[in-house]
Amino acid sequence: MLRKRLIGVVTVRAGLAVQSIGYQRYLPLGKAEYLIENLDRWGVDEILIQVIDRTTNGLGPDMELLAAVATMHISTPLSYAGGIRNAFDAAAVIQAGVERICVDGLIYSKPEELRAISRKVGAQALIISMPVMVQDNELYRYDYLSRKSLPMTQEFIALCQGDDISEILLTDVVNEGSTQAFNAELVGLASRLEVPLIVFGGITHDKQCADLLSRSEVVAVAVGNSLNYKEHAVQTLKDKLNFPLRPSAYRTGTGGWL
């Protein structure tokens, strides 16, 4: 069995890391670089940097932020989402030191561009971001650009099931920013996509994480707000989940982080 992952999420808006509540209210947390550095030291398996105002404002990737992160010598694998419009953007992000990219709703209407990105960076480096909700016992995806929920068309499902992507970031858009609120029904409804799932949104508790990780469709849980405030939150969560910390994450015997 492949080892499952705990992903720390840093959400960025208007140049600052924020605590997002339903992608409608935002509490500033400070410089994104500080949160990324902390998650690296604390031992998450992966860090997702999601810059949520790049696509909606018609901007490209936040290359300034990625350039700053590149100087920090982060050892944790990095993923990036926000403003990736085409294969040129995707390549620029990868060249900035990010292992994987996550493309959002702007690409769904341009399947040819998605395939071009996949050919450029490789399918293993490509994740589709899929904000979702349940309506009439069916899975609907939420389009941030039109602010509408849209049914899963056969064309869209075929796009997901192709050889162009590696995983789906399945975000509970209704419960994002809430406490212990991820709707596990979304996993069952998304299972027909037959694509490995990263689940995100309202995930805060170890029992909740354990339940989600026990599902065969789920390869990772992504946690944002609740990991940002307490130094030992990652270690505590991993201990309860029986996740080993990366050896370099904690300076044993000294009571402090590297």
Image: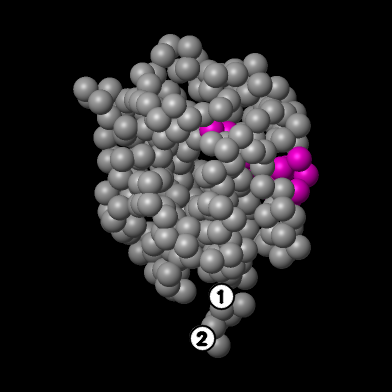
Residue 258 in the magenta stretch? The answer is: no
Instruction: Please state which of residues 187 and 170 is positioned toward the viewer in this rendering.
Output: 170
- Residue displayed at 32% across by 32% down: 133
Q: Is residue 194 visible?
A: yes
Residue 97 in the magenta stretch? The answer is: yes
Instruction: Please state which of residues 179 and 213 is positioned toward the viewer in this rendering.
Output: 179
Percent position of residue 204, x then y: 34, 57
Task: Magenta stretch: give its range.
Answer: 92-104
| Residues at discs 2 and 1 in contact (Cβ within 8 Å) | no
Percent position of residue 5, x then y: 49, 50
Q: Quadrant of residue 121?
A: top right
Q: Which residue is mark 2?
A: 255
> Taking 230 as reference, is 126 above or below it?
above
Q: How is the image coloured?
A: one colour
Q: Which residue is mark 1?
A: 250
Measured in 3D between alpha carbons, the distance from the residue under mark 2 to the one under mark 1, in whole angstroms, is: 8 Å
Residue 148 tag number: none
Q: Is residue 218 visible?
A: no
Instruction: Please state which of residues 101 and 195 is positioned toward the viewer in this rendering.
Output: 101
User: Mark 2: few, some, or many residues within 10 Å (few <14, many ≥20)?
Assistant: few
